[in-house]
Image (cartoon, coloured by chain):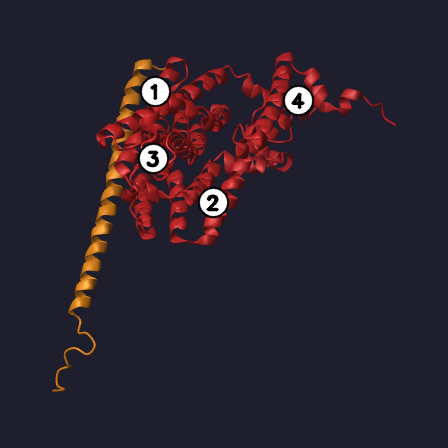
Amino acid sequence: MESFWGSVKLMLFIYALAAAISLITAWMIKYIFVVIRMQKSRAEARKSAKAANAPTQGGAAPKGTA
Amino acid sequence: MPEIHFLHLFQGIATMVASDPLIAFARILLIALGISFVYLGAKGTLEPLIMIPMGIGMASVNAGVLYLSTKTMGTIFIDPIAAGPEKLVDVLQINFLQPIYTFTFSNGLIACLVFMGIGAISDIGYMLIAPVRCMIIAIMAELGTMLTFPLAVALGLNYKEAAAIAMVGSADAPMVLYASLLLARDLFVPITIVAYLYLSLTYAGYPYLIRLMIPKHLRGIKMDQKTIPNVSPAEKITFAIITGTVLCLLFPVAAPLFMSFFVGVIVREAGVKQYVDFLGGTVLYGSTFFLGLMLGVLFEANTILNPKVILLLFLGMTALLLSGIGGIIGGYIVYWTSGRTFNPVIGIAGVSCVPTTAKVAQKEAHAANKFAMILPWAMGACVSGVISSAIIAGIYVTLLQVPTP
């Protein structure tokens, strides 16, 4: 029969390792999500800034026409 | 006209009369058990998708024993111990289920096919609502998978057998099948049957555990629906490809399972409707059907006479019970750390078993408060449970099975 105490130690090691990897995976997911969200909002902000700076129809006349 | 003996004509009865009384009794018992599985499956008490094919398989294989030669008895269903190319080619041409066993079962392919289907029907977006909280619950819900391991060793199983039966606590039957094939090939049939049998009972048993451990006012806590983010398919695909690759890198031994699950997820999120229908329908239900049928025909009288089966029945139940308790404790931990806004019933969904435990959680919360909607969080915990179970299976198999240089 294999050692009971050996199995208890192994169980504690496996549980700790599994918990660490699972939590790292969860944090990874969380940060991937945060980064994607940040990039998305930056892209949207850039887009709206561009739209605000762009000349509107009927606004300033093009150069050289005056 | 040749002389006709009644027993030569009806060989199922002849082999029963000629065999050891204990074997004959076990055959009769398994025929009765198979019939009752079909009945309870059709009635809805047990999971019909597995129990109906398993029951008919058990009843048929134990009834259909015949003389293969003048001295040997057997069936023309399957020969799980056929080894060597010549013998294997022989049985592939005789036993009608042998091709399915040899090419999909003994190499774990069927578990991977089920996983592809599970991936195709799982919305991992739910996990992104609260990934860390869901994972805390999932880790706690592995309590049975962990504590059953030393318990099984104390009761006389070796490390590999103990790890294989402990995996029942992960409540993920394809994972149990995969791990037991790699760790305890001699016991994979009874272990997988125990897993499927108990998992089909979780729907009936876990509600009592929830009511026992969580008072009604906590079961009815409403979750804030505004906190559910709108996750785009591109975000889910990014998550799936990164997580899948990292997990394969960490545990190559469980890489087929990880790949299968995440390919299902990616196909779903990519919106390839034809593949989603194929994996989530034909592949998932076809594999589940053959899985049930194969488990049934593998459950012959000799299997039940193995003295370890009683032990496996006890350990399997202990594993699932402890995992349920652990999941609810996980639910309480998140409830306390979230400022008492989290419904602790969600904890039971950490016991994987997609989507049964999530449905159980929602049903219990709804019974306590008809405005309590916790299914998205429960599905998140459920998907986290699949990932944490695969990680534990990977660690067990790597530590106990894989040769190192």
Query: Between tags 1 and 3, which lies in front?
Result: 3
Colour seen for chain A: orange
Q: Nearer the viewer, residue B101 or B138?
A: B138
Q: Residue furthest bottom?
A: A66
For mark 2, what is the residue? B280
Chain bearing mark 1: B
Chain identifier of the red chain? B
- Choose the circle earlier in sequence order: 3 or 2: 2
- Image quarter of residue B294: top right
For mark 3, what is the residue? B381
Q: Amino acid at mark 4?
A: Thr
- Residue at mark 2 shares a chain with residue at mark 4: yes
Q: At which x and y percent is residue B388?
A: 33, 33
For mark 4, what is the residue? B72
In the depicted structure, whether residue A44 falls above or below residue A59: above
Q: At which x and y percent is residue A20?
A: 25, 31
- Choose the circle earlier in sequence order: 1 or 4: 4
Q: Amino acid at mark 3?
A: Ala
Q: Residues within 10 Å of mark 2 (few under 14, many from 20)?
A: many
The residues bearing labels 2 and 4 have C-alpha atoms spaced at a distance of 43 Å
Query: Between tags 3 and 2, which lies in front?
Result: 3
- Choose the circle earlier in sequence order: 3 or 4: 4
Tell me the quarter of the image containing the C terminus of chain B: top left
- Choose the circle earlier in sequence order: 1 or 3: 1
The residues bearing labels 3 and 4 have C-alpha atoms spaced at a distance of 51 Å
Q: Amino acid at mark 1?
A: Leu
